[in-house]
Image (cartoon, helix red, strand yellow):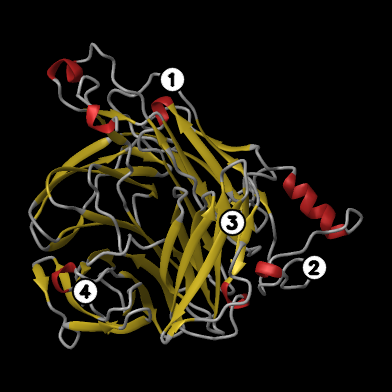
């Protein structure tokens, strides 16, 4: 990617955690929904997102994209703006803070005003709160580009006509060094609890958990690590303070002396709320972002494993004390199959388990479906996927995903190198896929697809007519399901298959508002 460096703000690399909230007004008493006595489904009126700092590499080239679909019934006015957050600490490539010390939380200590690096940090803080990317109209994505390692995390809010379905994405290409490859993450919502199976404290990995606080008061966070034998002893994982409207990167290997290949990270917010994402960087096989797994459940779906994957490693964890034998199935283009030799996988309570599934997909589209007996034991899970051979491999992560209940969007798509993968593991489904206008021109296109029960399909997604730039793909569930989806971006650089995969969770852009005339006297106790 050959890009021109932006201004100080847009040129900064973003570490992503995302702040989320949603607000909606009750329907007008004279509306049709109210007159019929039915609940109204209305667009949310306000929402928030957080995006992480993309990279610590000076070779990083990042594209930020923001988009809101056209939503019937949305307000005619509104804004959607991503702004720079303050950064509490600035780790170097070796994981230390800028003053050469690990410090508490793997972060830099406060700098003296006269210190040269303190002045550098102060200059960075001056960018906090300034706009980086702002939408102009629904249905048309906008982008900004940045080079290098100076960008802060981003904090964004959208209201009015932009709030329903607002989505943001950052895609970074790193040409060389630890984590080289394509790294992508969808900006996400703030919450109070996150699970990340698939992280590592091994010497070959440099994994950060990025915490972003969107609010005007400090958040206090605990980080728990679980390895193959249970919870790891940590030194400074409790009571981490994330200052208001700021971001804090925490190097996982500074939290414990134990070096383990497969670790599950549990983020618990004592007060406030944060956005969280893990950036997993490997010395040999590149790196990518690891989004949070879907909430612990007895049934999980990990959608869209690339058909040319050369290695698939499943990492699973159950938070309780009970062991579980997970039933493993692959939703292939022809239906659900059981992988030979991996029919069931045993996961001990409170311990992280990892399983090498090899070239699981064998040249076909596929999604993993994991089931606990009777759904009785909740589990979180993710897969680490490799493409390529020998010294020319790249890695990406696919966590267990939430279904596309109504609508979901993937950004930064191009005419070449984009794969949309959709699975309906429990029943036939019909979906509508809309390609938006391009960032620099093009006319939206829409297609409808049928997905057979138990299958995964890499569909030939529509492309805007006369496309210029990149575009958004919006998936809507029209019938049946549930539907799960992911999007893969891929390119080849120096013989290395760069790629990144993002699951498409529901955008939660619509909410049901009860009939105001409903008798609520039962609540008055």
**Badge 4 or badge 2: first in the primary sequence:** 2
Residue 220: numbered disc: 3
Alpha carbons under labels 3 and 4: distance apart: 46 Å
Residue drawn at x 53%, y 40% is 156
Percent position of residue 132, x then y: 59, 39
Residue 77: numbered disc: 1
Mark 1 neighbour class, 10 Å CA radius: few under 14, some 14 to 19, many 20 or more: few
For the C terminus, the quadrant is: top left
Mark 4 neighbour class, 10 Å CA radius: few under 14, some 14 to 19, many 20 or more: few
Where disc 1 sits, the SS reads loop
Alpha carbons under labels 3 and 2: distance apart: 24 Å
Q: Is residue 449 above or below residue 29?
A: below
Residue 99: numbered disc: 2
Tags 3 and 4 touching, CB below 8 Å:
no
Alpha carbons under labels 3 and 1: distance apart: 36 Å
**Badge 3 or badge 2: first in the primary sequence:** 2
Q: Nearer the viewer, mark 3 or mark 1?
A: 3
Residue drawn at x 36%, y 24% is 25
Percent position of residue 81, x then y: 53, 35
**Badge 2 or badge 1: first in the primary sequence:** 1
**Badge 4 or badge 1: first in the primary sequence:** 1
Alpha carbons under labels 4 and 2: distance apart: 48 Å
Tell me: 219 left or right of 503. Answer: right
Depth check: 470 or 290 in front?
290
**Res. 466 visible in picture:** yes
Tell me: 72 left or right of 452. Answer: right
Q: Nearer the viewer, mark 3 or mark 2?
A: 3
Q: Nearer the viewer, mark 4 or mark 2?
A: 2
Percent position of residue 375, x then y: 18, 68
Tag 4 residue: 363
User: Farthest residue in the front direction?
Assistant: 525
């Amino acid at each position: 990617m050959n890009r021109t460096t932006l201004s100080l703000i847009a040129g900064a690399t973003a570490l992503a955690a995302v702040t989320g909230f949603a607000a909606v007004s009750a329907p007008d008493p004279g509306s049709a929904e109210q007159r019929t006595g039915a609940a109204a489904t209305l667009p949310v009126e306000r929402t928030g997102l957080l995006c992480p700092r993309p990279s610590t590499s000076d070779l990083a080239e990042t594209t930020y994209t923001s988009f809101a679909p056209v939503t019937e019934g949305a307000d005619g006015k509104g804004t959607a703006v991503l702004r720079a957050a303050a950064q509490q600490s600035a780790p170097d490539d070796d994981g230390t803070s800028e003053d050469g010390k690990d410090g508490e939380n793997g972060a830099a200590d406060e700098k003296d005003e006269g210190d040269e690096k303190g002045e550098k940090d102060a200059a960075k803080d001056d960018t906090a709160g300034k706009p980086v990317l702002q939408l102009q109209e629904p249905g048309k994505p906008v982008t900004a580009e940045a080079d290098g390692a100076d960008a802060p995390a981003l904090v964004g809010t959208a209201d009015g006509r932009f709030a329903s379905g607002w989505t943001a994405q950052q895609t970074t290409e790193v040409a060389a060094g630890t984590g080289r490859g394509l790294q992508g993450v969808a900006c996400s919502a703030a919450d109070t609890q996150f699970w990340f199976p698939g992280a590592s404290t091994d010497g070959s990995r440099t994994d950060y958990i990025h915490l972003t606080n969107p609010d005007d008061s400090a958040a206090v966070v605990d980080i728990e690590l679980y390895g193959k034998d249970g919870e790891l002893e940590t030194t400074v994982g409790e009571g981490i303070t994330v200052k208001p409207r700021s971001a804090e990167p925490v190097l996982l290997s500074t939290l414990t002396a134990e070096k383990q290949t497969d670790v599950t990270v549990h983020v618990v917010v004592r007060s406030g709320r944060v956005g969280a994402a893990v950036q997993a960087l490997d010395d040999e096989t590149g790196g990518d972002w690891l989004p949070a797994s879907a909430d612990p459940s007895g049934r999980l779906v990990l959608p869209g494993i690339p058909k040319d994957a050369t290695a698939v490693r499943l990492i699973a964890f159950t938070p309780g004390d009970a062991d579980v034998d997970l039933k493993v199935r692959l939703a292939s283009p022809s239906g659900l199959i059981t992988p030979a030799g991996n029919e069931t996988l045993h996961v001990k309570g409170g311990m992280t388990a990892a399983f090498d599934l090899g070239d699981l997909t064998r040249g076909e589209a596929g999604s993993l479906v994991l089931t606990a007996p009777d759904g009785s034991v909740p589990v979180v899970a993710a897969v680490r996927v490799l493409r390529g051979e020998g010294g020319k491999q790249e890695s990406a992560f696919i966590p267990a995903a939430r279904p596309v209940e109504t609508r979901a969007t993937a950004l930064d798509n191009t005419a070449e190198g984009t794969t949309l993968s959709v699975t309906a593991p429990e029943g036939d489904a019909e979906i509508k896929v809309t390609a938006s206008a391009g960032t620099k021109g093009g006319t939206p296109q829409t297609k409808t697809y049928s997905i057979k029960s138990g299958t995964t399909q890499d569909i030939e997604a529509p492309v805007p007519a006369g496309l210029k730039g990149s575009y958004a793909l919006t998936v809507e569930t029209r019938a049946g399901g549930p539907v799960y989806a992911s999007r893969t971006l891929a390119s080849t650089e120096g013989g290395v298959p760069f790629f990144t995969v993002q699951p498409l969770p529901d955008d939660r852009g619509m909410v049901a508002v009860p009939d105001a005339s409903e008798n609520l006297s039962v609540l008055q106790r």
